[in-house]
C-alpha cells in the first residue's frame, strides 16, 4: 500500500557516494537537485537524500537520459541501478 503524502513533503532516497558522484558529474540536473545531493546525510554506508516526488521524477529523467545515451556499458549499468532505486522510492508514495 502506498503512503499518501503532500506535494511539498520530502521522502528519503538512499544512494552510495559513488552513485551521487556519478549523478553530479554526468547529468545535466538542475542546481537545486545537485545541491540536495551535496548536502545529504550519511547513514551507515549509504547517503540519505531528501527529495519531493516531483524532484525525484526530474532527477530520474536526467538519470535515464544518461543511461540511454551512454556508450560505456559499466556506467550504463550504474545509471540503470540509480534509476531503479529512484523508481522504487517513487512507487512507495502517492500525492494527496
Image (tube, rainbow, N blue to C red):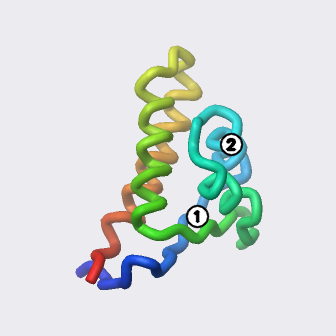
Q: Which of the pair 61/82 is nearer the observer?
A: 61
The correct choice, above or below, for 61 with respect to 14 in the image is above
The correct choice, above or below, for 10 with respect to 23 in the image is below
Q: CA distance from mark 2 to mark 1?
A: 15 Å
Task: Indicate the quadrant where residue 50 lies.
Answer: bottom right
On the rendered structure, is 25 left or right of 51? right
Q: Residue at x 68, y 58 (%)?
A: 37
Q: Which residue is mark 2?
A: 24
Q: Which of the pair 68/96 is nearer the observer?
A: 96
Task: Indicate the quadrant where residue 32 lies.
Answer: bottom right
Q: Secondary structure at mark 1?
A: strand
The correct choice, above or below, for 92 with respect to 64 in the image is below
Q: Residue at x 51, y 15 (%)?
A: 71
* Quadrant occupied by the N terminus: bottom left
Q: Which of the pair 6/80 is nearer the observer?
A: 6
The label on residue 14 is: 1
Q: Position of residue 54 (x, y in %)?
A: 41, 63
Q: Position of residue 59 (x, y in %)?
A: 49, 50
On the rendered structure, is 93 left or right of 43? left
Counting the numbered discs, the total is 2
Q: Secondary structure at mark 2?
A: helix
Q: Residue at x 73, y 71 (%)?
A: 41
Amino acid at each position: 500500500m502506498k503512503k499518501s503524502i503532500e506535494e511539498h513533503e520530502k521522502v528519503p532516497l538512499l544512494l552510495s557516494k559513488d552513485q551521487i558522484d556519478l549523478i553530479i558529474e554526468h547529468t545535466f540536473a538542475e542546481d537545486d537537485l545537485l545541491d540536495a545531493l551535496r548536502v545529504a546525510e550519511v547513514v551507515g554506508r549509504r547517503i540519505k537524500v531528501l527529495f519531493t516526488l516531483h524532484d525525484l521524477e526530474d532527477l530520474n529523467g536526467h538519470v535515464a537520459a544518461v543511461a540511454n545515451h551512454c556508450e560505456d556499458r559499466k556506467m550504463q549499468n550504474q545509471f540503470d541501478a540509480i534509476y531503479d532505486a529512484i523508481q522504487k522510492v517513487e512507487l512507495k508514495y502517492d500525492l494527496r
